[in-house]
Image: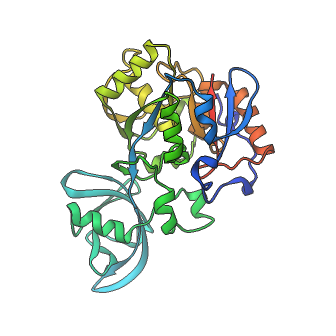
Amino acid sequence: MQLSDFDFDLPDGLIATRPAQPRSSARLLLAQGHAGHEDLHVYDLADILNPGDRLVLNDTRVIPARLRGKRLRDGSEGAAMEVTLLEPQAGGLWRALVKPLKKIRDGEPIAFSADFSAVLEAKAEGQALLRFDCDGDDFETALNAAGAMPLPPYIEAKRPADAQDQHDYQSVWARHKGAVAAPTASLHFDDGILDALRSRGIEMSFVTLHVGAGTFLPVKVDDITSHKMHSEWGQVSAAAASEMATTKANGGRVIPVGTTALRLIETAARDTGEIAPFEGDTDIFIYPGFEFHVADGLMTNFHLPKSTLMMLVSALMGRDRVLGLYDHAVAERYRFFSYGDASLLLP
């Protein structure tokens, strides 16, 4: 399989820079089986799913990981620096992307505000290790005050993050802090649709996968089978695993909301073929030929050309089927990517 097999033409005007309001008014492209589709809306979801089906929701919480500051050298301000936090490390350090990394030396601080700064401890493989001047609750308070939501590059190229993104780029059930990118299919849900789903008898389980900045990394090899996926930390609790197993045993469908939830539950079933509790890092790469053990469908947004997520949905539905759906979505002017519309894929 070649990278070009997962390419398509996308007009720039279809890249969404703000989400639909209200959230559940986003459009929903329903695809069931090998042919056909329906143009619906996310608020129709309770009428599409069956009582006894189970949605799997990623409850990670996005941190305001984008920081802008000034390098300090010899007591004076120097180059402007942009920092994107990636993940905490042992000993109170943070792994981060720093731009421009070449303009800061080991041991030099970056000031983000009058009382919030970090020192560059080391550089490795194009990334930085930073030590902040506070920790615990003080760090969280300072980060919330100085940081911005780390919007994807295709949105930030059109506009900077603002205060509205603090709300928009977070699911209503976000709980466990640690993501630097949102599980964007989750952004379509509001309290009204959650109430409608529960009233219909559709059940929900929560899992956690802290989405990393690697989700935006391009595939750089022509032969996709040689691509190395980034690693992300996730957890499927014993209770969530039991709920999914019970749903399948009772004839219901397990439908993850978002590719992050799907990748996590398939990781949790990789050893035995059955869903089991899991905690740790996953670098699972799902492309055509993959055998699904847990997911009976997927709710997801529309993805970038030649991305690993295009490969994932092609594994679920078939490449030709997916490309046909994307041709329809482009023709009907669905909105693409993180703040865009959604699809419900039921093979």
Front residue (pair 175, 283): 175
Q: Residue placed at 70% from the left, 39% from the top?
A: 7
- Residue 133 is situated, as x and y percent measured from the top left of the image, at 22, 70
Q: Residue 314: tell me if it is visible.
A: no
- Residue 104 is situated, as x and y percent measured from the top left of the image, at 36, 72
Q: Residue placed at 21% from the left, 57% from the top?
A: 92
Q: Residue placed at 58% from the left, 20% from the top?
A: 289
196 shown above or below 109 = above
Residue reaching furthest to the right = 331
Q: Quick one: quadrant of the C terminus?
A: top right
- Relative horizontal placement of residue 97, taking residue 346 as reference (left or right): left
Q: Which quarter of the picture shows residue 37? A: top right
Q: Residue 30: tell me if it is visible.
A: yes
Q: Quick one: quadrant of the N terminus?
A: top right
291 shown above or below 99 = above
Front residue (pair 249, 214): 249
